[in-house]
Every structure is written in C-alpha cells, then in structure tokens.
Image: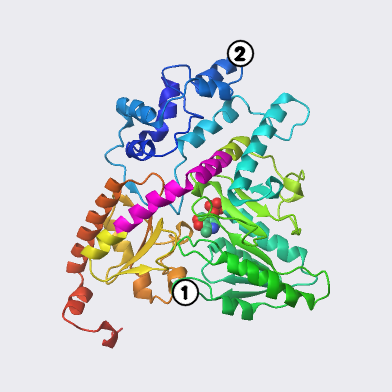
Amino acid sequence: MIVSSLRWGISATRPAYRQVLASRAPVVRRGYVAPSSKSAMATILDNNRGKSRVANDDDLDAHPVSREEIFSRAMEDGKTERPANRPIYLDAQSTTPVDPRVLDAMMPYYINQYGNPHSRTHAYGWETEHAAEQGRKYIAELINADPKEIIFTSGATESNNMSLKGVARFYKSKKNHIITTQTEHKCVLDSCRALQEEGFEVTYLPVKSNGQVDLEELKKALRPTTAIVSIMTVNNEIGVIQPIKEIGELLKTYGAELAKELGRGTPKPFFHTDAAQALGKIPIDVNDAGVDLMSMSSHKLYGPKGLGACFVRRRPRVRLEPIISGGGQERGLRSGTLPTPLVVGFGEAARLAKQEMVYDHAHISALSKRLRDNIMSRVEMVLLNGDPDGYPGCTNLTFQYIEGESLLMALKDICLSSGSACTSASLEPSYVLRALGLDDANAHSSLRFGIGRFTTEEEIDFVCDKIVAVVNRLRELSPLWEMVQDGIDLKTIEWSG
Ligand SMILES: Cc1ncc(COP(=O)(O)O)c(C=O)c1O
C-alpha cells in the first residue's frame, strides 16, 4: 500500500531506530497513527478525492499507538531492513535524518492544507498561517524568545549572512568594525571577507588550544566602533562550546561603555551567535546569554532541509538592512512566501528537541564515551581535539601517522567526515584544527565522529572495531610509523626535496 510504504519507509532504513526510539520517554501520541486503521495520510488522500473532511488532531489521537508498535509493524514489513550495503551514518554535523514524527506533522501541509500562509482572504491561508505561527512558537520556546523575534530564512548560511551584512550595513555611518573568530563556519568568515571589500574592518580572534575564545583577547579587540561580534555557540568540527553568557555580559558592560564614546544612544556591539550546531542539543536562553541575533538550521535538528531561522531581538531593538527584498514578510527583514510544511516540520523538530533534550544528551554522551574509550584504549597515539567538555555528539580524533583521507577511503562502510562538509572538497588541512595549534600532519590525520539521536550502541561498536583494524593496517604499511616505533623523533629529520 502506497501510504504505508511511504510512511514506514522513513524509518525503514534504520531498523535500529526501533530500539532507540522504543526506549525513549515519554511516548508521544501525536502523529502516530495505526497503519491498519485509517491513517491521517489516508484521510488526507480521501479528502483530496473530495470524500472526507480535513484531518485534525482528533483524527490523529483517535488511533494512537506506541513507538514500539510502530517499529514492530515497520519491522514486519519485509522491506524495512536496512539494506546490507547502506553504510553507518556518523556525520550528524553535516545533516541529520528527518525524525519520522516530524515528517508526520508536515505531510498534511503538502497535500491538503496547501494554502499560502500570507493569503488573508480565505480559509486555506488562515489555516496555514495558524500552523506556521505554531511552528514559530515552538522554535521561540526552545530558545526562550518571543515568537515575533523568529525570522525564517533558507538556513543558517542565510541567517549568518543576514545578521552580519544586515547589521554592519545598517550601522555603517557610525560603526565600521566587526569581531569574529578564526574557527567560525565558512559562511561567517566569507560574509566578513565580503564586508572587508565594502570597507569594514574585521578582527579574526585566535582561539585557545581547546578551541574557546579568550575573553581577555575579546575585550582587547573591542572598539567604540565595533558594530557586531559574531561567535558561534558550538563548533561544527570540534564541538567546543563557547562561553556565550560571558561574551554577552562583556558586550553589555564594557562594550556599551566603549560605545558611549560615540555619543549617547549609540548601541552596544550586537552579539550574534551561529547556533546551527547547538540548537536543541544544549540549553540556550537568548535572554540569559545576552544574545541579539542567533542563526539556526532545521536540518541539523532532525527537521526538513531548506529552512532556517534567525532570532532578531526586538527589545532593545536590533536593526538591520535586509539582504532579500520583496513582499515585506517576516517583519520586512526577509521577504518571500513561508514554506508552511517546512516551518511546521522545523517547529515540530524544535518541540521534540525541547521535550527530549535531556534524554538525547544522555544517549549521545553515553555513545560518545563508549566511542572515545573504546578507540583510545585500543589504539595508541590518538589525540582528542578540542575541549573534552564540549558537545559530546561531535568527537574529533587525530590518528597520528595516518593520512585522514586514506583512513576515510578504507572506511567505506562508515560515513564520516574529516571536517566541515562545506570544505571537504578541498585538500587543505582544516583551518579549525590549525587554529587550535595542530600542525599540518596532525590536522590531516583527523576524523570527526558525528553521533546523533538515532545512533545505536551496535553501530558505535562496529565503528570502533573497524577503526582499530584499519588504523593498525595502515600503520603497518607506513614507513613513518616504523620510524616512530624505532624511537626516531620525526621532527629531527631533514627531508629532502
Ligand atoms: C556551524 C554552522 N553554521 C552554519 C552552517 C550552514 O547551515 P545551513 O546548511 O543551514 O545553511 C552549518 C552547516 O554545516 C554549520 O555547521
């Protein structure tokens, strides 16, 4: 049956989800409909054929089943085994799978409730506007913001561009200085480069060896003319968590003092944080942290791809020049028709993240510890990059005397990355690892392990065994490793050519 294979196909690729989700608490009824009884999808399809009424929450609640049930039904369907040739996915920083519950929430807005949420003259518009506003509310609740402060964009890349370029250009008559760090995502660094071309001055702060910014360095870099400071919450390559509360405090106090030199009423430096890797993974409170602008991405949070958001503070108001002009949607800051299904999906992903953050964090921490302990106890000369107390779902390890790309090639049945997906096409060593002080050789020998909500213990154990075997094999073939084994200090060797 089309409906059920469409629905269950989502979880089908990962039979192990069954084990993970079945153990999650609390059981969420919304969106799970017994496939044998008339499902929400069937109701919607019927409705499209002009037979029935709109599916609503009552329909959904009418046939609740537990997650266990869902997955056992999915398992009974012969097509639901993970195909033997599907590799294990350990790249959660690049993107995450859509949570089946998120897809359930989105479906009605593709097929039946398809109105333009900006249509004010009819019910199709009203119902999608209501759904989109509910999604906005869930995202706001996740970061303790007002829903009016959530501006939808196409993703964190756009939110970062919008924040940096928007604020810098708006305040350019008074301020021309921007501060960021050397370890930001490419889209922040490239936005800053573009602003330099326009005449702005940018300070790229170095980071400490654990990847955190030095608050003293930040203080020294602040100027009366600093318009915006952009420092990410969680780094996408090493998982380091920045002290955003302390940064927010510094800008509110010392930053505001400096700004007064330009005259009363001059705003303090605005604080922008790229939270693409932090949203829903660690608690964030924009008010507590003194954040003025925050970039978010749906696809890093088990939500649909193609949508992001930017928190833009209303009180005190942050002003920015929009980078996209048009119909004036999203408080005039980002024109364009809201994609209701995506907004509903992102909202549902945010609601689930808030509800399950403690569980997710415990699950991911336990798997991360299992991975680190297993590999580091069985393989010598492995270094953990970044801060050991960073976000555990992002573990970056250096396997000394092995070339990272060869390691990746030998690990065909595991999807890993040697850094950011955006820069993986380049053979340059990671600029993030270089900023921590790693030399080129160690930076080239590093892998990022991205653990997510649906990763299982079995997968971690498989990965560890595989890594241990491959590292040992590659080192056996490596003349450098042989020299190290013979006690030769490679730094003392003068290489010819
Ligand atoms: C820290 C960080 N910022 C921004 C982005 C870009 O996000 P999006 O794919 O939503 O544009 C990413 C994605 O890799 C990221 O990890």
Is residue 312 left or right of 353 when viewed as pictured? right
* Tag 1 secondary structure: helix
Q: Residue furthest top?
A: 51
**One can see residue 46 in this view:** yes
User: Overall secondary structure of the magenta stretch?
Assistant: helix
Q: Which residue is denoted by mark 1 in the rendering?
A: 435
Numbered badge on residue 269: none
Q: Position of residue 214 (x, y in %)?
A: 54, 76
Q: What is the basis of the colouring in this image?
A: rainbow
Q: Of callouts 2 and 1, which one flags the residue occurring earlier in the amino acid sequence?
A: 2
Q: Residue 130 occupies which quadrant of the picture?
A: top right
Tell me if the residue at label 2 has its CB under 8 Å from ligand 1: no
Of residues 235 and 250, the one nearer the viewer is 250
Judge from the rendering whether residue 56 lies leftward or rightward of residue 129; answer left or right.
left
The residue that mark 2 highlights is 50
Q: Which residues are magenta?
A: 346-371
Residue drawn at x 62%, y 59% as measured from the top left? 288
